[in-house]
Image (cartoon, grey):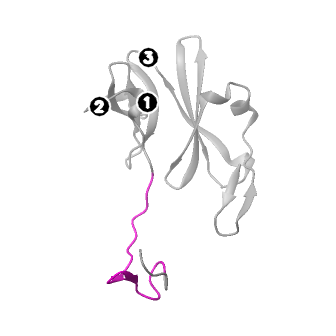
């Protein structure tokens, strides 16, 4: 399901059959480089894996494309998010966080400790809001709305 804040309208985004055949709790939705991404977890012949799929054209079913597959071997447990350089942040079984390079397959320990459920990545966009006292300056990002 989607919700457009601009239009206040609900909609749907369809997933490929390859992503809908498994358990729904095995899917994780996030953003990467302004594109919708789905992490699809599953079990294969060599253990647990995480496939990373990207929707290259928003809302177009045929634009889903698999970027890569990460075999969660050794101590890798769960993908948490992406870094700006394209590496994947993955929690480990030793309660740490590593940066995984999908091109080389190498992990870099980030020295950050915590439980798998405690790691969360959220995308943000910087913006400037001009303030004058307690009011937003008209024509600013929230033009005319006072008292922040």
Residue at the farthest left position: 111
Considering only order in the chain, which callout, 3 or 2, is on the residue closer to the N terminus?
Answer: 3
Element type at marker 3?
Answer: loop
Asked which quadrant contains residue 111, the reply is top left
What is the x, y in percent for residue 57? 65, 55
Q: Report how far apart the C-alphas of labels 2 and 3 lie in the structure.
A: 15 Å
- Answer with left or right where residue 2 lies relative to residue 76: right
Between 64 and 26, the one lying in front of the other is 26
Q: Nearer the viewer, mark 2 or mark 1?
A: 1
Residue indicated by mark 1: 117
Asked whether residue 126 is drawn in magenta, I would say yes
Read off the magenta span: 123-142
On screen, residue 36 above or below 49: below
Between 74 and 69, the one lying in front of the other is 74
Identified at 44% across, 16% down, the residue is 73
Identify the mark at residue 90; answer none if there is no mark: none
Q: Main secondary structure of the magenta part?
A: loop
Asked which quadrant contains residue 90, the reply is top left
Label 2 with label 1: CB-CB less than 8 Å: no
Residue indicated by mark 3: 73
């Amino acid at each position: 399901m989607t919700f457009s804040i601009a239009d206040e309208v609900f909609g749907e985004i369809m997933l490929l059959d390859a992503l809908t055949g498994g358990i729904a709790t095995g899917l994780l939705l996030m953003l990467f480089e302004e594109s919708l991404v789905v992490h699809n977890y599953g079990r294969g012949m060599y253990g647990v894996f995480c496939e990373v799929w990207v929707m290259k054209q928003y809302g177009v079913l045929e634009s889903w494309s698999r970027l890569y597959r990460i075999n969660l071997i050794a101590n890798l447990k769960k993908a948490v998010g992406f870094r700006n350089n394209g590496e994947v942040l993955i929690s480990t079984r030793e309660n740490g966080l590593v940066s995984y390079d999908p091109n080389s397959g190498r992990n870099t320990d980030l020295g950050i400790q915590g439980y798998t459920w405690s790691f969360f990545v959220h995308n943000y966009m910087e913006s400037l809001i001009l303030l004058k006292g307690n009011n937003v300056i008209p024509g600013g990002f929230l033009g005319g709305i006072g008292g922040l």
